[in-house]
Image: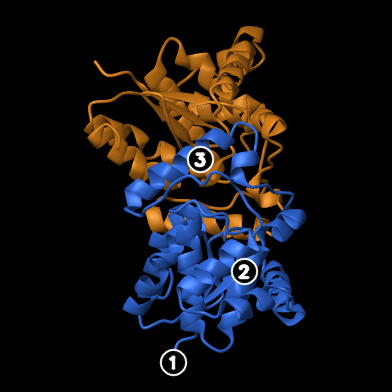
Chain colours: A orange, B blue
Amino acid sequence: MAKPIDFYFDFSSPYGYFATTCIDAIASKYGREVTWRPILLGAVFKVTGGAPGPMVPLRGDYVQRDFVRGSAYYGIPYKTPTVFPVSTQTAARAFYWLNDTDPAAAKKLASALYKAYFVDDINISDPAQTVAVAAKAGHDAAKGEAAIDDPAVKEKLKAATDDAIARKVFGSPFMVVDGEPFWGMDRMDQFEKWLKTGGW
Amino acid sequence: MAKPIDFYFDFSSPYGYFATTCIDAIASKYGREVTWRPILLGAVFKVTGGAPGPMVPLRGDYVQRDFVRGSAYYGIPYKTPTVFPVSTQTAARAFYWLNDTDPAAAKKLASALYKAYFVDDINISDPAQTVAVAAKAGHDAAKGEAAIDDPAVKEKLKAATDDAIARKVFGSPFMVVDGEPFWGMDRMDQFEKWLKTGGW
């Protein structure tokens, strides 16, 4: 059995959102599972000296334009959020709350959180909003609220982010296939070819 | 007659090199000409706070791997240069030396300089090497040598770089089609679709 693909993303990354809409389907064509790992890009940027694209001089307008243009090109619903970027601890902790016991439910919640933020303009950095999205997905709101403040859940997110940095993950989305790293929604074609051919 | 496409690149950019191998052919499918404009990314990075990918923490190894992997994916010859990145004033000035009187010859020289650097491992930051490439392409070596130090030629490169920054060009390759900006070899598919459809 082939090893699962590691898939890293940040909940404030539009390209990460785009990738969540297609990565499991691509992987399954080649008999592969995908392990989703939301991380905090803010911690990564402290190491790389990077910044969210929209905040970089000269580049900000382009990046916002590219999100919108790319969404239409890929056929993925997208609306520029009123507040962007946002901190993503809350959303990522909600994911890790579910992930150990039910990874499929955690993926569904991640997709619902991305949709809330990038389609319905809901600010998922607000714990109440993240909990509301989880409740709508059928999870217990009180448990979700508690989980977001649970030191054990916080530690899972910290460990995932530290592990990503140790593996030289520097952006979102970021896929690692049998040790081979692919960064960006615009590497999805090469990522798929790698799965299909085993590399070149 | 449709306006020419503006195409910006830096001679030390592998993705810029990849773009030069295909951009004129893509544009001509849609009846468009391409104006090539080598610039100095170093000056751009002073504004954006950016740095060449291979020098960014966490990202360096990936970028070098992506150059090699991408070249094979696209079917473009590429060999990691011994010295990388290099300063590109000399190569860019050689381009602007020819460009006003013979843009086609300037493009041919640019392609020869890219090939020298990214295939034959010739350090084109060395004026003697750039002049040798120009001479091999049929140009007068003494005139080339003089042009590289000509204040008028230097000024053309400075003006092109300043103009690029004023138009918010922040990377290489960078294409502008009727005011619509596209950054990166990995936007060539969207760039072509834009040419084909007139936008979306």
What kind of residue is marked 1? Met
Residue nearest the observer in this picture, A128 or B183:
B183
Check chain identity for marks 1 and 3: say if they share one. yes
Q: Using the image, determine if residue B3 lies above or below residue B171.
A: below
Residue A200 position within the rendered picture, expressed as x and y whole percent measured from the top left = 30, 37
Asked whether residue B13 is in view, the answer is yes
Which numbered mark, 3 or 2, is in the foreground of this view? 2
Labels 1, 3: front one = 3
Give the Cα separation between the discs numbered 3 and 2: 23 Å
Q: Is residue B176 above or below residue A98?
A: below
Residue B18 left/right relative to B129 = left
Q: Sequence order check: which comes first, mark 2 or mark 1?
A: 1
Q: Depth check: B39 or A31 in front?
A: B39
Give amino acid for label 3: Gln
Seen at 24% across and 15% down, the residue is A1
Cα distance between the residues tagged 1 and 3: 40 Å
Circle 2 chain: B
Tell me which label, 3 or 2, sits earlier in the chain.
Answer: 3
According to the picture, the residue beneath numbered tag 1 turns out to be: B1
Q: In which quadrant is the C terminus of chain B drawn?
A: bottom left
The chain identifier of the residue carrying mark 3 reads B
Q: Is residue A122 left or right of residue A6?
A: right
In this picture, residue A97 sits left or right of residue A104: right
C-alpha span from label 2 to label 1? 29 Å
Which residue appears at 63% of the width and 11% of the height? A155
Residue at horizontal 44 percent and vertical 51 percent from the top: A77
Which residue in the protein does label 3 denote? B64
| SS for callout 2 | helix
